[in-house]
Amino acid sequence: MEDLTLTLTLLLLGAAFMAGFVDSIAGGGGLIAVPALLLAGFTPVEALGTNKLQGLFGSGSATVAYARKGHVDLKAQLPSAVLAAAGSALGAMLATIIPGDIFRAFLPFLLVAIALYFAFKPNMNDIDRARRISPFLFGLMIVPMIGFYDGVFGPGAGSFYMLAFVALAGFGLLKATAHTKLLNFASNLGGFAVFAFAGVIYWKVGLMMGAAQFAGAQLGSRLAMKNGARIIKPLLVITCCALAAKLMADPANPVRIWFGV
C-alpha cells in the first residue's frame, strides 16, 4: 500500500471516530472502519488485521467507561473474556479454511431477524429478566462460539453478543451493551494476536485510527449510559439493518450469485 494522502488520512480518522461511537452503543463499528480501509487501498486481509488493532482501542475504551460506572464487573467476567479471545484466535487461524461464503450468504437474514427481535419484542428496556441459561453454560458455550465467529468472519459479532445477553442471560439493554463491549475487546484481542503474528497489520495507521476510535467510544458509551435503552434499541436496529443491506449489496454475496441478482 502507498503512503496515505491527507484526504485519506482524514477519512480514516473520521471513520474510526464514528466506528468507535456507534460500536460502543450498538456494535457494528466494522461496518464503517473496514470499508474505509479498503477504500484507502488496503487488501482485505490487511483491512481486517488493521481493523482489529484499531478496534481494540474502541472496545477497550468503552469497556473501561462502562466498568467505571459499575455496569460490568471485569473480574467476574474474566473467564468469559478469556474464552472469547480463545475462540476468536481459533477462528482467525481457521479463516483460510472455513468457507466464508456460508457466513456471507446467511448473515444478512440473521441480522434482519435480530433487528426485528429488538424492534418488536415487548418490554425491551434496561431491566434484567429471568435468564434462560446458567452463567456457567453461557460462558462455556455461547461466548466462545461467538468469539470464533468474530475471528473467522466478524461482521455482526456485537449484535450476536447483544442478542445472547438479552435473550439467554436475561440482561437489560444497557447491561448487555456493557458486557458486549468487554467480550468484543477480548475477541478483538484474540484475532489481533493472530493477524499480528501473520504480519498483515499496518501499525502506524492502526494506532492513528485507534486514537480516534478511543475518543468516539468514550462519547458513545457516555451517551448510552445517559439514555439507556432509548438510544441503544433504535441504534441497534438501524445498525443491524444497515449491515444486512451492505452485505446483500455486495456483488460477491453468494445469494446474489445463486439467484443471478
Image (spheres, helix red, strand yellow):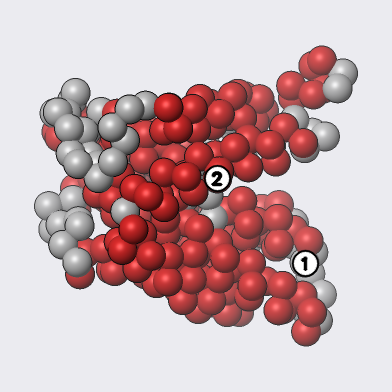
Say how many tags the image has. 2
Q: Nearer the viewer, residue 223 or 17?
A: 223
- Seen in the picture, residue 228 relative to 59 is either above or below; the reply is above
The residue pinned by badge 1 equals 40
Quadrant occupied by the C terminus: top right
Q: Position of residue 151 (x, y in %)?
A: 49, 44
The residue pinned by badge 2 equals 239
Q: Which residue does the image show at 77% across and 36% down from the upper left?
A: 249
Tags 1 and 2 touching, CB below 8 Å: no
- Seen in the picture, residue 56 relative to 112 is either above or below; the reply is below
Tag 2: amino acid: Thr
The answer to which image quadrant residue 204 occupies is bottom right
Element class at badge 2: helix
The answer to which image quadrant residue 222 occupies is bottom left
Tag 1: amino acid: Ala
Element class at badge 1: loop
- Crowding near the residue tagged with mark 1, few <14, some 14–19, many ≥20 C-alpha atoms within 10 Å: many
- Seen in the picture, residue 71 relative to 130 is either above or below; the reply is below
Residue 25, label in figure: none
Q: Along the polypeptide, which appears first: circle 1 or circle 2?
A: 1
Residue 177 as seen in the image, left or right of residue 202: left
Residue 20 as seen in the image, left or right of residue 63: right
Could you tell me if residue 253 is visible in this image? yes
Q: Position of residue 46 (x, y in %)?
A: 67, 59
Q: Nearer the viewer, mark 1 or mark 2?
A: 2
Q: Position of residue 66 (x, y in %)?
A: 26, 63
Q: Nearer the viewer, residue 201 or 17?
A: 17
Could you tell me if residue 183 is visible in this image? no
Q: Position of residue 189 (x, y in %)?
A: 40, 58
